[in-house]
Amino acid sequence: MTKLSAIPVAVACVLLAATAALGQDTPDVRVSRGSPTAPFSQNKQNEPTIAIDANHPAVLVSGSNDNIDMEACNAGDDTTCPFTGGVGVSGVYFSFDSGQTWTQPTYTGWTARDCLGVPGADAGCAPHVGSIGTLPLYFENGLVSDGDPAVAFGPKPANGSFSWANGSRLYYANLTSNFGATRSEAAFKGFEAIAVSRTDDVQSAAAGSEAAWMPPVLVSHQSSTTFSDKEQVWADNASSSRFFGNVYVCWANFAGQEKSPNAAPAQLQVAVSTDGGNTWKTHPIGAAANNGQRNPLDGCTIRTDSNGNAYVFGVGTLSSQGHNAFELASISSNGGGTWSAPRPVAGPVTQPGVIDPVLGRPVIDGVAGARSDLAPAPSVDIANGAPTGADATNRIVLSYVSGDIAAPHVYFTESTDGAATWTSPRTIETAGDRGYYTAPAISPNGSDVYVVYNAFTTPYRTETTSPRNLVGVVLHADVAGSSTGTFSELDRGADGDPRSSSQNNLVGEFLGDYVYAAATRTYGAAVWNDSRNGADCAAMDAWRLSLRAGTSVPRPAPQQDCTPTFGNSDIFGGGFADPTP
């Protein structure tokens, strides 16, 4: 298929160079390069994110929840594998060849990676300043990087204005907590806040230079009971936009953490920066609620079109629609100054998972499985023509998982009129795949759509002895005329048993809350949760089931009772060439 483009010749040359690194049959690769295969929980990574520098499309960054610096289970009580106090988990990885190879830098900060312990009694872990594989400068600023990563590239500001000629700026948003154990040592009020790290020199950052990073900036405004969660970040990266260079962060603001007998009241928040992330102004989206009448937007995502209109999406219930859940959208046409009331764009949607009696959260693969709270949450992308906006179509693509436990489907829908109307959602997963998490990406010129998803290929298990299977899949479709065509597989990752993954408290599996995708005019990039290198542990399976059945089974010591690669979950992905250029 021949695809016409209005991009400048100089940008086209850069795209051709980026594409040269990609073959038509590019295999997926391990993105979390620095993580060891053992011990648990240092071998645990999940919740991947990815972004492409629109002005340098061979440059990518990814992030994940990365336990690389945590203490081993054998430190202290051998049957516990705690999050070591003060140790960060916001991993960062760089690629300069369109996602074919990745590097994970080493910095200095608060670490417990050498707290390995011994079988049996020992003194436990004494974390200290040393090598870390996560974001730098948090310990030095009284903070801990707590994961839920989100990344975006935008133009670098200079002399009060934005231009790609100034260079590119990387924004990395994540949760953060106080390093200090007492309130007097707190850098902010509340339980969890949102912080943004930034760098204008990704080459030096990838080489391990802490000086390449600016200190983290706190974005969320906190009370003593606030728990901020599930943030996403976006930078307006099309120079045609009226608000080129604006940066947006959205998140769920749980305002009554541990105060409500039912659930913490929550409100979606959007913070906007017009000065490259130095300062932020916060705007509420809808009212705070979390009750039988209405649930506010959660699992948000945010994007901008070539004109500078900003769109924030989330999943929430509507009392006017029988308290059913829908994908909702709120729009700002003035650079994030004001936002429209959230309105439904797709649905109703359902949480496919079954509530696990111990976790108290939905799971899709089976009892003691990996939580699936945000499976129905929307992921979105817009063909905004970045970096210039010249060839934008502003097509909006959206994907999510919905259905019942027998058939959790990956749904796709799209809009070509600024989110006013949407196509009927259609299922796009490969036959036999039971959807878990998904994310779409559309090329800046709107010619190609890529969708990544995690799925289980085994039915819901009511016991823990039978094998389970997790896979990552990348799909592609051409945009033909007014609609996106049929999707086909670009990549299908290796099989893995998710029972090999684990929460740090060991009572269930853990694979986080999302996957992610991005796209250029010549290739798509995707990252997903992967368990191909993990080993199931029969002793852990038996103990987890006993917690649900009320039987008595000894709590395992993972490093004594399990294969060394128990708990080893990785981030896999890469760049995948447009198969129909």
Image (cartoon, rainbow, N blue to C red):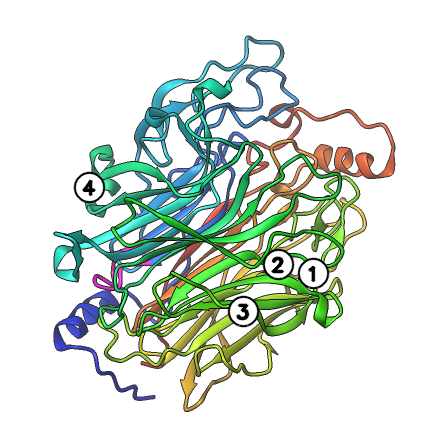
Q: Which mark is residue 580?
A: none
Q: Position of residue 188 (x, y in %)?
A: 44, 30
In the picture of the structure, the residue carrying the numbered disc 4 is 204
Q: Position of residue 441 (x, y in %)?
A: 42, 68
Which label lies toward us, 4 or 2? 2
Name the residue type under label 1: Gln
Please say if 412 is above or below 59.
below
| Secondary structure state at the residue bearing disc 4 | helix
| Secondary structure state at the residue bearing disc 1 | loop
Residue 482 appears anywhere in the view: yes
In this picture, residue 389 sits left or right of residue 578 = left
Which label lies toward us, 4 or 3? 3
> Which quadrant of the rendered structure holds the C terminus?
bottom left
| Secondary structure state at the residue bearing disc 3 | strand
Q: Which mark is residue 375?
A: 2
Q: Mark 1 or mark 4: which comes first in sequence? A: 4
Bounds of the magenta span? Answer: 52-60
Q: Mark 2 or mark 1: which comes first in sequence? A: 1
Q: Report if residue 237 lies within the magenta region.
A: no
